[in-house]
Image (cartoon, rainbow, N blue to C red):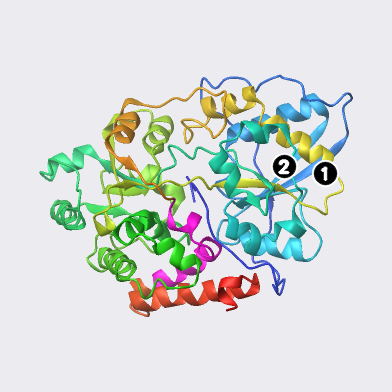
Amino acid sequence: MKRALILLAAVVLAGCSGAAATASPTAAPTPTLAPGATPAPATPTPAATKQNLTLTVLESQGWVYPSEQALALRFQDLTGIKIDYQIVPSANYFQVLSTKLNSGQGPDIFGGQSGVSDLKVTYNVEKNAVDLSKEEWVKREDPNAVAQATLNGKVYGQEIWDIYSGYWIVTYDKGIFQKAGITSVPTTYDEFTAACDKIKALGVTPIYEPISDGWHHVLWFPEVGAQMESLEPGLYANLNANKTTLAANANALKAMTQLNNLYKSGYLGNSSLSATVADQEKNMTTGKFAMTVSNLTLPTAISTDFPTVPATNYGFFPIPLLDNQLLPTHPAGPTKFIWSGSKQIDAAKQYLAFLAQPDSLQYLIDNTPAFATLDFTGVKAKWTADQQAFMDKYKAATVNVLQDDVMYVNPQWMDIGKDEVAMFTGKETPLQVLQAIDKRRATQATTAKDPAWSK
């Protein structure tokens, strides 16, 4: 997910069979920062003496940037505590994590996606994670991010992520739009498909959509959840109260149908099923693709990795399914949890405290192209003029994206991805995809003993 960006997905821990994973964790490579990167901060941690121990950190691919690995090396210099990152491909991550937690062999720290339903269903944090409510850094973290890592009044995770420029929007190549005679960005779905037709006429694939990772193509639907809510106020509340379903909602069906039409119309090209997130930057520099779903920092990341390509080559507009023009507010993101079974909980807390120090946070911002800022006070953002103009132009949604505010959606992210592939290939209809989401929501809610499903 970001380039594997924000990864979402899931396996229900309660009742999990603990089947063997199909991929094994591997140690993270030695970090290599971009030219001109600043040294990692030298602020000492509270430890009085150095300790000779190793903390294992299990993370999904794309959640750990080289800048964080550099901080881990600095932390080792200061404390003697080695950080052993084990990075798992995103398609296999939750299976690996579930197997480890259920077998009682969890890592000292494990990565996850924040969100109340994920905390309850995917990670069972009340059993598997340590209460971090009294940690000093909690007071400096954005309250919206803290809320996504809180269950029954206790904070279980630390989210260090750019939740502000992390809007999932459409990034487009300005030069290709100009060649196609597109003089303004689309503001409706019909305008969007008309633009895609003009781009196809140039021999250019309108949209780079990396489906093979299993998660990225899912973004199109839940990221316009706020638009569904605006078209039918009370939808989120009724879904959470088990008073309605997505399959019964005309706008949800319309959005899923529109997504299916993008694929059926050839706007995603002939290679989308095998395309990868890791190739997103490179492919957006080739002139073969006009648009992709990303966050606001993709152009900065492109210009960092491909110095001859200016970030100003690219512009942004909201995902236009259902004629959406709202910014998708999304305070959830990759989050670190300390495993309750760890024998090194104090050392793990020390590492999280080090990552959340103001100089560590600023180091991450300054040396991570995918971050323009972070969800803590006391840091200096690095917005570009195009990013600021985009945020000034569009109105942020008053509710979060579907997966953050509607229970039992985010934990089934990868399953939704499989259903959407079945839809693209003609094995399922848009209605059947929504019915499958509803069925899994009901199963998860029943497992969680949600009173709204036990009436």
The residue lying toward the viewer, choosing from 429 and 447, is 447
Secondary structure under the numbered disc 1 in the rendered image? helix
Q: Position of residue 65 (x, y in %)?
A: 57, 38
Q: Residue at x 79, y 65 (%)?
A: 103
Q: Position of residue 298 (x, y in %)?
A: 39, 39
Q: Which residues are magenta?
A: 400-421
The residue lying toward the viewer, choosing from 290 and 350, is 350
Q: Is residue 409 magenta?
A: yes
Q: Quarter of the image holding residue 249?
A: bottom left
CA–CA distance in space, label 2 to label 1: 14 Å
* Residue 309 in view: no
From the image, give the main secondary structure of the stretch colored magenta.
helix
**Quadrant assignment for the C terminus:** bottom right
Q: Position of residue 60 (x, y in %)?
A: 60, 51
Q: Which mark is residue 345?
A: 1
- Side (left or right) of 269 relative to 344: left
- Side (left or right) of 180 relative to 88: left
Q: Which mark is residue 133?
A: 2
Q: Earlier in the sequence, mark 2 or mark 1?
A: 2
- Marks 2/1 in contact by CB < 8 Å: the verdict is no
Give neighbour class at mark 1: few <14, some 14-19, many 20+ (Cα, 10 Å).
Answer: some
Q: Identify which amino acid the numbered label 2 is placed on.
A: Ser
- Side (left or right) of 405 relative to 20: left
Secondary structure under the numbered disc 2 in the rendered image? loop
* Residue 409 in view: yes
Q: Identify which amino acid the numbered label 1 is placed on.
A: Ile
Q: Quarter of the image holding residue 46?
A: top right
The residue lying toward the viewer, choosing from 87 and 135, is 135
Q: Position of residue 43 (x, y in %)?
A: 72, 19
Vertically, is 151 above or below 354?
Answer: below
